[in-house]
């Protein structure tokens, strides 16, 4: 005769069916892979302002190459805005003049992402005169996709980007130069705040007219 405890026989533990267990494992691996890709390879940002028109329009959704400059873990806790310790991977490349970069807002501003064009590297002298951008005395034409200014762009500079040291700094401008909050307002962008390079528009919605079917798939240049 089988012995029982005072409370009766022990109930058998419910076993998870093999298919359900396999599905749970696959789901967990898929979520982990998606998070790893989002954190270290490719992420997406929404363009909320007109500062990069017409290269990027309000309502564009852009894929960001995070791997190219050395991916890092998030700087802020989502929704809460609390700072997090940052782990950065080795970078296969570095930002170049003319790249459209994505970076965290400067210190002292709400934690959000900006998208601007990098125009000044360490050691460069940047000047805006009569709406013309000069870097080290050489005229840099506006990108073909840039929105022509509606009003004269105020002169700015000269300003020298500090030479590379312990912290590398960049000077950025919006392509829509008469309607952009950029390095002219809040100074240089430290390299450790750069998230990646804008790659491609994958979706675009105009709040008035709806989906812009011609923009998805557009490479950001």
Image (tube, rainbow, N blue to C red):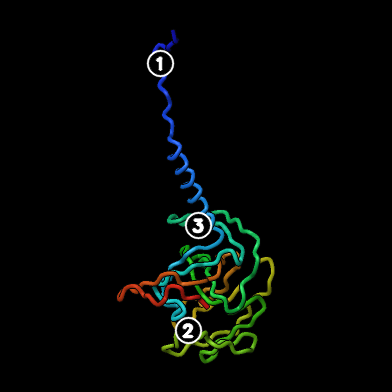
Q: Of callouts 2 and 1, which one flags the residue occurring earlier in the amino acid sequence?
A: 1
- Give the residue pinned by disc 2: 146
Label 3 to label 2: alpha-carbon separation: 31 Å
Label 2 to label 1: alpha-carbon separation: 78 Å
Q: Nearer the viewer, residue 36 or 89?
A: 36
Q: Quadrant of residue 162?
A: bottom right
Q: Residue at x 55, y 70 (%)?
A: 197
- Give the residue pinned by disc 3: 76
In contact (CB < 8 Å): disc 2 and disc 1? no
| Mark toward the viewer: 2 or 1 | 1
For this orientation, the residue located farthest to the top is 1
For this orientation, the residue located farthest to the front is 19
Q: Residue at x 43, y 35 (%)?
A: 17
Residue 219 screen position, x and y as percent: 50, 75
Tell me: residue 183, above or below residue 13.
below
Q: Is residue 218 left or right of residue 157?
A: left
In contact (CB < 8 Å): disc 3 and disc 1? no
- Give the residue pinned by disc 1: 9
Q: Of callouts 3 and 1, which one flags the residue occurring earlier in the amino acid sequence?
A: 1
Residue 108 screen position, x and y as percent: 50, 65
* Local crowd size for mark 1, using a 10 Å CA cut-off: few (<14), some (14–19), many (≥20): few
* Local crowd size for mark 2, using a 10 Å CA cut-off: few (<14), some (14–19), many (≥20): some
Where disc 1 sits, the SS reads: loop
Q: Quadrant of the N terminus?
A: top left
Q: Nearer the viewer, residue 7 or 214?
A: 214
């Amino acid at each position: 005769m089988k012995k029982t405890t005072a409370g009766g026989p022990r109930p058998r533990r419910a076993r998870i069916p093999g298919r359900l267990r396999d599905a749970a494992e696959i789901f967990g691996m898929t979520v982990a892979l998606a998070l790893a890709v989002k954190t270290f390879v490719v992420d997406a940002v929404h363009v909320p302002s007109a500062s990069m028109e017409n290269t990027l329009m309000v309502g564009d959704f852009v894929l960001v190459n995070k791997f190219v400059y050395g991916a890092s873990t998030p700087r802020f806790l989502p929704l809460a805005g609390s700072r997090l310790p940052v782990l950065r991977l080795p970078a296969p490349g570095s930002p170049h003049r003319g790249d459209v970069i994505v970076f965290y807002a400067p210190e002292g501003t709400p934690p959000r992402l900006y998208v601007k064009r990098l125009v000044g590297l360490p050691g460069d002298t940047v000047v805006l005169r009569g709406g013309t951008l000069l870097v080290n005395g050489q005229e840099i034409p506006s990108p073909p996709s840039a929105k022509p200014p509606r009003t004269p762009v105020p002169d700015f500079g000269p300003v020298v980007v500090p030479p590379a040291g312990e912290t590398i700094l960049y000077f950025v401008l919006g392509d829509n130069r008469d309607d952009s909050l950029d390095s002219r307002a809040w100074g240089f962008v430290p390299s450790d705040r750069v998230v990646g390079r804008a790659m491609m528009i994958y979706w675009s919605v105009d709040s008035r007219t709806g989906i812009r079917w011609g923009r998805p798939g557009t490479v950001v240049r």
